[in-house]
Image (cartoon, rainbow, N blue to C red):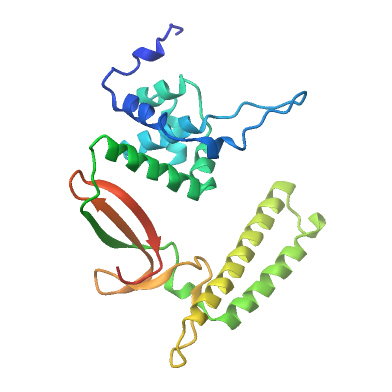
Amino acid sequence: MMRPVDVEKLVEETHPVRGIWGLVCQLDWSRFEEDVKVVEGGKGRSSTDPRLLAALWIYAYSEGVNSARELSRMCGYEPGCEWLTGMEEVNYHTLADFRRKDKQGLDGMFVQVLGILSAEGLTDLKRVMQDGTKIKAQASGNSFRREETIREHLKLAQEQIEAMGDPDSEEFNQRVIKAKQRAARENKQRLEQALEELKKLEEGRKASDKAPRVSESDPEARVMKQSDGGFAPSYNVQICTEASNKIIVAVEATQAGTD
């Protein structure tokens, strides 16, 4: 079936997505536009407007969606997303890269949002409440190792990478070999990060404390007490909320066991 579509009529005038777009357009996006360059006489490709990516994510969060893949699918059927994109597709890689590329820049954007909300009288930040919740990490308690063990595993990981350097060493096709090499490199990177985390723990360790251990699969996780009285590798997510209008003003995952 082929039929004409008026994009402006996809959502009503009072739809929240219009307010989100209006808010986003008031922000300063110069930091995110620095990488968008045009070279005279050279071939290029179109760049997705950072305002559009931010508006899509804010709208997705308001709808309870935090997956880049799901948001990309929504651009093909959800009226609010279709209105924002003009019924164009947005690749999930583009959405995911935008969210994690420049954390400091996004933090600055959220500061601007709070400033606009304050100017409009929607928040005053006079009373802010803070609380934390433990989020279990994707790691087992058995994955925690001391420095000697981690160094041994790091050496084995390096040897494994070198052994897979020759495509003829295994009877697999190129795609399988590259996947195995990538997995080995990622494992090596996690082990190197685990050693860095051990250094941080050593700096704050008292002479009477036991030798520190960190997880080989999730080096930044820390063992924390849970609400059921048990212990598990976790992160402590701190959330600050403005009391009057219940607006979340800050979120951070920490390694501290207490609030």
Between residues 118 and 218, which one lies in front from this camera angle?
118
Q: Quadrant of the C terminus?
A: bottom left
Image height of 234 relative to 44, above or below = below
Q: Is residue 140 left or right of residue 11?
A: right
Between residues 99 and 50, which one lies in front from this camera angle?
50
Q: Quadrant of the N terminus?
A: top left
Q: Position of residue 63 (x, y in %)?
A: 31, 36
Name the quadrant containing residue 3: top left
Q: Position of residue 223 (x, y in %)?
A: 39, 73
Between residues 174 and 115, which one lies in front from this camera angle?
115
Between residues 48 and 68, which one lies in front from this camera angle?
48
Image height of 94 relative to 156, above or below = above
Taking the view exactly as shown, the residue that stands out farthest to the front is 119
Q: How many numbered discs, if any?
A: 0
Q: Is residue 93 visible?
A: no
The residue sitting at 66% across, 27% down in the picture is 45
Q: Is residue 201 visible?
A: yes
Q: Is residue 17 left or right of residue 56?
A: left
Q: Position of residue 254 (x, y in %)?
A: 39, 64
The residue sitting at 46% across, 45% down in the picture is 106
Taking the view exactly as shown, the residue that stands out farthest to the top is 3
Taking the view exactly as shown, the residue that stands out farthest to the left is 244
Q: Is residue 98 left or right of residue 136?
A: right
The residue sitting at 41% across, 37% down in the picture is 57
Image height of 36 relative to 210, above or below = above
Q: Position of residue 2 (x, y in %)?
A: 46, 7
